[in-house]
Amino acid sequence: MEVIIKQDAEKVSWEAAALFCRQLREKPDSVFGLATGSTPVRLYHLLGEMAQAGELDLSQATTFNLDEYVGLPGAHPQSYASFMREHLFAHVPVARWHVPDGMAGDIPQLCAAYEQAIREAGGIDLQLLGLGSDGHIGFNEPGSSLGSRTRLKTLTAQTVADNACYFSSPAEVPRHVVTMGVGTILEARHCLVLAFGERKAQAVAAMAEGAITAMVPASALQMHPVCTLIVDEPAAALLQRREYYRWVYENKPAWQRA
Ligand code: GLP
């Protein structure tokens, strides 16, 4: 896993935007896995600004979002489909975008079809991920099988509390979600994890330097051959090898840079 430590969230977002640009230069019809939450918002806005300036083109790209709340229609303001429209798709035209349908009558069938659609698109080239404060990726809560596929999950009380700020009360946060599995995520060709702030420091350290365990689903990314973790200083605070990561980044050959 490559760990990149940037001074602040703004610089993390710029570094991530550069990786999106590089991916599109190499393959204009790339397939992106996308995330929601507060972490990728600035990155999406940067991509929007770059698209408007003619510096980035997603018009041949396909996207698949990681997850969606069950029971929220796509038009609900807190659905992840609305989030994506607001922060990205309204500003950057993409060829095809997919967010799981939280209102599907047959959830197992929806999940199987989502996996099938990813396969038919040729698999995910670059998968963007945020990190839950409990170490989850997508909505794969602690205890999730590291081989899991897209399926229904029940949120932990901690995740409900973390996400309650987006709803008028914690009681309104749906308890169920559909999420790509850890196994689904691991099949992406490149995984890119972003994390900001002191609140994520423990999860970042457990993910990058702790044992690989279902109790920290993000730790499964240690098994991924091409995983980039970009964090700001507060999120890096508990990394034991942070000076080495800085050293590696400073000495990175030019051809490896985004
Ligand atoms: C939710 C999302 C995750 C996201 C996480 C972190 O649980 N399902 O994909 O990574 O929140 O959220 P934030 O970026 O707001 O800290």
Image (tube, rainbow, N blue to C red):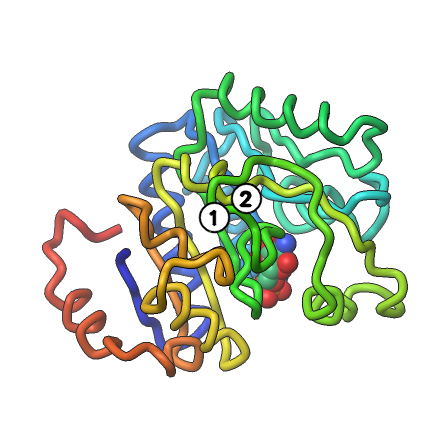
Q: Is residue 244 left or right of residue 32?
A: left
Q: Which one is earlier in the sequence, the residue at label 1 or at label 2?
A: 2
Please report the residue visible at 40 percent of the width from the left and 69 percent of the height from the top: 231
Placement of the N terminus among the 4 image quadrants:
bottom left
Q: Categorize mark 2 by other alpha carbons within 10 Å: few (<14), some (14-19), many (20+).
A: many
Q: Is residue 195 left or right of residue 100?
A: left
**Along the viewing direction, whichever of 188 and 140 lies nearer the viewer:** 140
As drawn, 71 above or below 9: above
Disc 1 marks a residue whose amino acid type is: Leu
Disc 2 marks a residue whose amino acid type is: Leu
Q: Which residue is mark 2?
A: 34
Q: Judging from the image, what secondary structure is the residue with disc 2 in?
A: strand
Residues marked 1 and 2 touching at CB (< 8 Å): yes
Instruction: Answer whether residue 145 is visible to the viewer in this image.
Output: yes
Please report the residue visible at 44 percent of the width from the left and 26 percent of the height from the top: 123
Give the percent coordinates (x, y) of residue 151.
66, 37
Q: Which residue is mark 1?
A: 128
As drawn, 121 above or below 26: above
